[in-house]
Amino acid sequence: MGKHGQRRYTSEFKQQAAELAKRIGSRKAAEQLGVAMQNVDRWKKLAENQEPQSKKEKVNLEVENRRLLKENKEL
């Protein structure tokens, strides 16, 4: 346990909890996992916010790669 009796959860656990909550709801997921529903809601929100961002980053990288390839051909 961390400071003040707080439990620490791994990133993998949080991600799996978020996926479970998407399928069966935060309340049921929290009950099954034995954690507070507020934690599950927070992890679910974080997972949802990270997903589109990573897709956007991937698209930006692909665009930049194409631009650089074109630039290299011109040199």
Image (cartoon, rainbow, N blue to C red):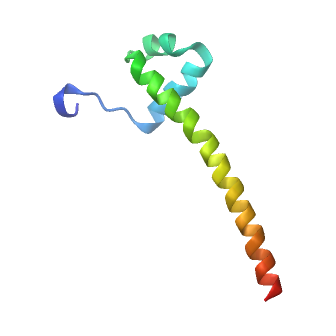
- In the image, farthest residue toward the left: 4
Residue at figure coordinates x 71%, y 54% from the top left: 59
Judge whether 65 appears above or below 45 on screen: below
- Closer to the camera in the image, 34 or 69: 69
Whether 61 is drawn above or below 13: the answer is below
Residue 13: % across, % down: 45, 31
In the image shown, does 32 or 70 lie closer to the viewer? 70
Q: How many marks?
A: 0
Residue 54, image x, y percentages? 61, 47
Name the side, left or right, on which 1 lies relative to 51.
left
Quadrant of residue 23 within the rendered picture = top right
- Which residue is nearer to you in this view: 5 or 62? 62
Tell me the residue at 58%/33% (across/down).
48
In the rendered structure, the answer to whether residue 66 lies left or right of residue 26 reads: right
Residue at x 77%, y 80% (from the top left corner)? 71
Residue 61 appears at what percent x and percent y?
68, 61
Say whether residue 16 is left or right of residue 23. Answer: left
Quadrant holding the N terminus: top left
**Residue 31 percent across, percent down from the top left:** 44, 10
Tell me the residue at 38%/18% (across/down).
Answer: 35
Q: The C terminus appears in which quarter of the rendering?
A: bottom right
| Residue that sits furthest to the bottom in the current view | 75
